């Protein structure tokens, strides 16, 4: 087989081939001259090609690369626990969760990036970071919500390129639960043997399921719902994204138990039920559980 002049020069330079299109490339080149692929990219965990782009997708086989957000767990010394998982049908996890404790306060924030918006995973991440940092410092729910909204708004380049996220935050202190939310992320009370449990939040959504409130540059003048709840006995506060609660509708709420074990059990329930969406669960115990 004849060798073309460009191939010969590339071989003489000790270069290899572009992992995407196979065109010979010179040593030291940053891009493939034929297809424009960035040379020296990370290696795909599936096909082995050095072809992973800046968004985390392999340009050869198309696989979204695993990240630390695909599955993560948090367990606090006091027993509170959280888990977030990509689920079975989504290419990446656009949920985010924070679980923090300081003094007598425990803070949980769960945000679900709006899938129809760009960079939804970034929106949920910055919202969780801003809100949890504010709440653990003792700021009010309204202040934390505003800071989270600003963080998400800064991601937008225009109203047509506006990342968005839903929001729910909980602060547990001295046996009292305070909540703030916008969108369809939810909080439930799971009582230990007392009939005062159930849903603590109301979804911002219309009958067809579209949400009517969120964080983002195109959210308008959205303000959080705020509720204070004082349980009559021990139990667990459950804060979660719709990747879980859609599989709880029509089913009895679980009995409270050890938070990490229950979080994993609820995750398995969501996955076994189809795992259509990202799944995030945070559980905070109040009082002495059986």
Image: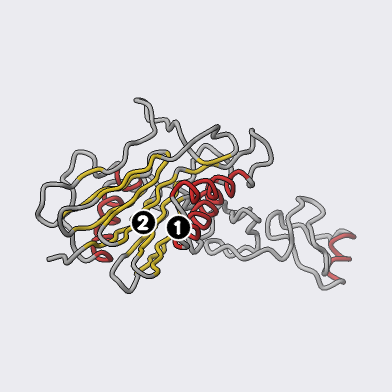
Q: Position of residue 154 (x, y in %)?
A: 64, 46
Q: Position of residue 113 (x, y in %)?
A: 49, 45
Q: Which mark is residue 54?
A: none
Q: Residues within 10 Å of mark 1 (few under 14, many from 20)?
A: many
Residue ID at (25%, 62%): 285
Residue ID at (87%, 60%): 6
Q: Residues within 10 Å of mark 2 (few under 14, many from 20)?
A: many
Q: Are marks 1 and 2 in contact (CB under 8 Å)?
A: yes
> In what element is the residue under mark 1?
helix
> In what element is the residue under mark 2?
strand
Quarter that holds the C terminus? bottom left
Quarter that holds the N terminus? bottom right
The residues bearing labels 1 and 2 have C-alpha atoms spaced at a distance of 8 Å
N-terminal of the pair, mark 1 or mark 2, is 1
Q: Position of residue 257 (x, y in %)?
A: 18, 63
Count up the numbered dots: 2
Q: Nearer the viewer, residue 13 or 201?
A: 201
Q: Nearer the viewer, residue 170 or 142?
A: 142
Picture layout, residue 253 above or below residue 48: above
Picture layout, residue 142 above or below residue 236: above
Q: Quadrant of residue 77?
A: bottom left
Picture layout, residue 41 above or below residue 221: below
Q: Nearer the viewer, residue 119 or 101?
A: 101
Which residue is most to the top? 207
Q: Which mark is residue 135?
A: 1
Q: Is residue 166 left or right of residue 118?
A: left
Q: Nearer the viewer, residue 81 or 178?
A: 178
Residue ID at (24%, 44%): 248
Q: Is residue 251 left or right of residue 208?
A: left
- Name the residue carrying label 2: 171
Q: Quadrant of residue 10?
A: bottom right
Q: Quadrant of residue 117?
A: top right
């Amino acid at each position: 087989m004849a060798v073309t002049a460009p191939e010969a020069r590339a071989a003489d330079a000790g270069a290899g081939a572009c992992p995407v299109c196979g065109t010979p490339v010179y040593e030291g080149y940053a891009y493939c001259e034929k297809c424009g692929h960035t040379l020296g990219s990370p290696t795909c965990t599936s096909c082995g090609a050095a072809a992973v782009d800046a968004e985390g997708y392999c340009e050869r086989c198309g696989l979204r690369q695993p990240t630390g957000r695909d599955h993560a767990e948090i367990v606090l010394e006091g027993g509170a626990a959280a888990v977030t998982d990509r689920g079975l049908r989504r290419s990446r996890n656009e949920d985010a969760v924070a679980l923090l404790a300081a003094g007598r306060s425990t803070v949980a924030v769960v945000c679900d990036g709006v899938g129809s918006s760009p960079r939804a995973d970034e929106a949920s991440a910055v919202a969780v970071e801003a809100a949890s940092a504010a709440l653990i410092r003792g700021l009010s729910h309204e202040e934390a919500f505003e800071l989270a909204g600003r963080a998400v708004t800064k991601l937008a380049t225009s109203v047509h390129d506006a990342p968005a996220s839903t929001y729910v935050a909980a602060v547990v202190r001295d046996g009292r639960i305070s909540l703030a939310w916008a969108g369809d992320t939810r909080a439930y009370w799971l009582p230990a043997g007392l009939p005062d449990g159930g849903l603590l939040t109301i979804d911002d959504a219309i009958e067809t399921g579209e949400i009517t409130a969120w964080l983002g540059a195109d959210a308008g003048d959205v303000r959080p719902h705020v509720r204070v709840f004082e349980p009559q006995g021990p139990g667990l506060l459950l804060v979660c994204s719709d990747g879980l609660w859609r599989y709880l509708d029509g089913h009895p709420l679980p009995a409270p138990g050890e938070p990490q074990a229950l979080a994993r059990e609820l995750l398995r329930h969501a996955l076994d039920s189809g795992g259509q969406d990202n799944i995030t669960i945070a559980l905070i115990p109040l009082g002495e559980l059986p």
